[in-house]
Amino acid sequence: MGTTKHTIDPANPPKTSKDDLARFDTIRDEDIDYSDIPDLDDVQFEKAKKVPVMVRYDADMLAWFKAQGPGYQTRMNAVLRAFFEKNRDGARG
């Protein structure tokens, strides 16, 4: 079996057909080339830790994020992270 590489735009992923899914199911794990995946380091694992917490949000803000579809909590986290990254050194604005 030959190697096929594709570049995928995460903002515009291709549709996956039932035939594609069936074909993927026939590929053995040992035949998958993982060589282009970067090694994970401790920093990446630290960022990946999620902590369950109860929070209160304004109803309209929560409704807006939920209306964006699945993954709304991840998007909310991304917004908070962007604010954190910009302001963590004490900078304002």
Image (tube, rainbow, N blue to C red):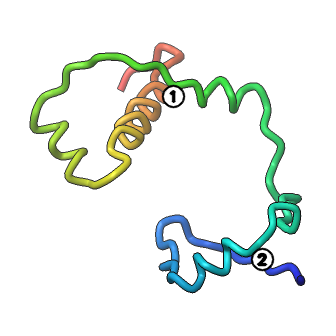
Of 46 and 19, nearer the camera is 19
Question: Which class describes the residues within 10 Å of circle 2: few (<14), some (14-19), or many (20+)?
Answer: few
From the viewer's perspective, is 76 left or right of 9? left
Give the residue displayed 61% in from the left and 28% down from the top. Answer: 47
Which residue was labeled with disc 2?
5
From the viewer's perspective, is 63 left or right of 84? left
Mark 1 residue element: helix
Give the residue displayed 50% in from the left and 18% down from the top. Answer: 88
Q: Of all residues shown, which one is farthest toward the top?
A: 90
Mark 1–mark 2 Cα distance, whole angstroms, equals 34 Å
From the viewer's perspective, is 12 left or right of 45? left
Q: Is residue 70 above or below residue 53?
A: below
Where residue 74 sits, quadrant-wise, is top left
Give residue 29's position: percent from left, percent from top. 81, 61
Q: Which numbered mark, 1 or 2, is in the foreground of this view?
A: 2
Q: Name which residue type carries label 2.
A: Lys
Is the C terminus in the top left, top right, bottom left or bottom right quadrant? Answer: top left
Give residue 85's position: percent from left, percent from top. 51, 28
Give residue 61's position: percent from left, percent from top. 17, 37
Of 60 and 92, nearer the camera is 60
Q: Of all residues shown, which one is farthest toward the left?
A: 60
Q: Name which residue type carries label 1.
A: Glu
Q: Is residue 9 above or below residue 78?
A: below
Give the residue displayed 89% in from the left and 83% down from the top. Answer: 2
Q: Is residue 59 above or below residue 14?
A: above
Mark 2 residue element: loop
Which residue was labeled with disc 1?
85
Q: Earlier in the sequence, mark 1 or mark 2?
A: 2
Question: Which class describes the residues within 10 Å of circle 1: few (<14), some (14-19), or many (20+)?
Answer: few
Give the residue displayed 61% in from the left and 72% down from the top. Answer: 8
Where residue 48 sits, quadrant-wise, is top right
